[in-house]
Amino acid sequence: MRGVMMLFFQVLILCFQAKAWHAVRRSFELEQTTAPQEKLHLITDCMHVTSEEGEFSFVKLPPVRSTSKHGAHWMTPGVEAAERADPDDPSLGAATVCGVYFVADPDQTIEVTMRQVNVDCRTGGLMAFVDGWELNGQYFPGERDHEKPLELRVQEFCAEQGASVGGGPWPPKTVGAASNAWVFRSSQNAALVQYRIPERGSFVLSARFHHNPKPCNIMAEGLAPYYMLRNYGLRRNCTLTALFPAVVSVVAVEVGEINESVRYCERVRMDDRLEVGGSVGLDPSYQLVRASTICGRSRGRVDLDQTILCGTTSVRLISSGRHSNQAMVTMRMADESDLQLATVICEM
């Protein structure tokens, strides 16, 4: 009898241990599956502008021929028959170049990691990372204002043998990057991934924003209460650009000789100056219509308001490297009440 009781207790202990191990294993599995997932964004517009981090995915499939009792029509695989492909969709054009435009906070840079690339070079497919933005052949920051030459700012690639169209290898893999992932970094708070996919293709990328301790060129996202432009004592030009008509207010300035009060410097050739104006294109260094040119040092709040009715509004700090220049400005989108006080009007 005692042997039967001992056997019974041993069976109970084994059952308890099995249940306990099962609970521990389930807890571990749940912990593994609840890891934070990267936010997924589906790219549907040819010009996709975003200020969010996360994972971005694009897929293009060729339309297939389908017939029904109502007649023949084109449809895309995986889409309901009632949802027809739009023939006027610009992304369907063989030569259309589209892009994912990133803009972060003024004191951030952008890191883009290409997770997957299925863009065939042989069919005319092409992708490119742009350190900045490109629109209609013009770049921000302007070619004269960026620390890198344009050939280093634009890196083209596609999926053919993992090589760039120029025949060279992809950029070197960043230390710590995931397997088969290629990493690009911007020099300012604006970056662009362009793609041309004539027939079919897809890509997946992730974007991360990092702190920039010395921002120079800034793409205005319209949310900051004010913007600071500094050259940090270097010979460099720094530009604040907004892609909308805006009212610019120069709050404080210290440009050039600090013993001179703030003054307008249009008639005197100054190596250190602050230019406020607008342009039709993205690069103000070529076609900026100036509203004012300012230099000197403010000894209090200035509040020089100027309304720029142009497609692009820019504040450009030009520095010789002999002075530590800085300027604080605010920028807001112009409305109807600002039309009569326009300082500069560009042809739209």
Image (spheres, rainbow, N blue to C red):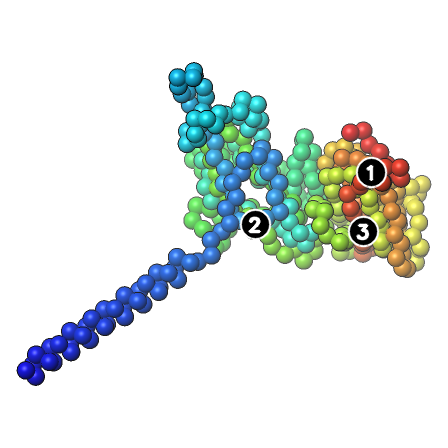
Do the numbered discs 1 and 3 sit on residues whose CB atoms are within 8 Å?
Answer: no
What residue is shown with label 3?
329
What residue is shown with label 2?
53
Q: Is residue 243 left or right of residue 87?
A: right
Q: Secondary structure at mark 2?
A: loop
| 26 or 260: nearer the viewer | 26
Quarter of the image with the C terminus is top right
Which of disc 1 and disc 2 is earlier in sequence? 2
Which of disc 3 and disc 1 is earlier in sequence? 3
Depth-wise, is mark 2 or mark 1 nearer the camera?
1
In percent of width and height, residue 7 lies at: 11, 77
Position of residue 11 relative to residue 40, above or below, is below
Residue at horizontal 48%, vertical 38%? 203
Q: Is residue 12 left or right of residue 106?
A: left
> Separation of disc 1 and disc 3 at Cα?
22 Å
| 61 or 323: nearer the viewer | 61
Q: Quadrant of residue 155?
A: top right
Q: Secondary structure at mark 3?
A: strand
Q: Residue furthest front?
A: 70
Q: Is residue 283 left or right of residue 64?
A: right
Q: Residue furthest bottom?
A: 2
Residue type beneath disc 2: Glu
Residue type beneath disc 1: Glu
Q: Quadrant of residue 89?
A: top right
In percent of width and height, residue 293 lies at: 88, 44
User: In this figure, what is the number of numbered marks?
Assistant: 3
Residue at horizontal 35%, vertical 65%? 27
Residue 336 image label: 1
Residue at horizontal 93%, vertical 49%? 263
| 177 or 338: nearer the viewer | 338
Residue type beneath disc 3: Val
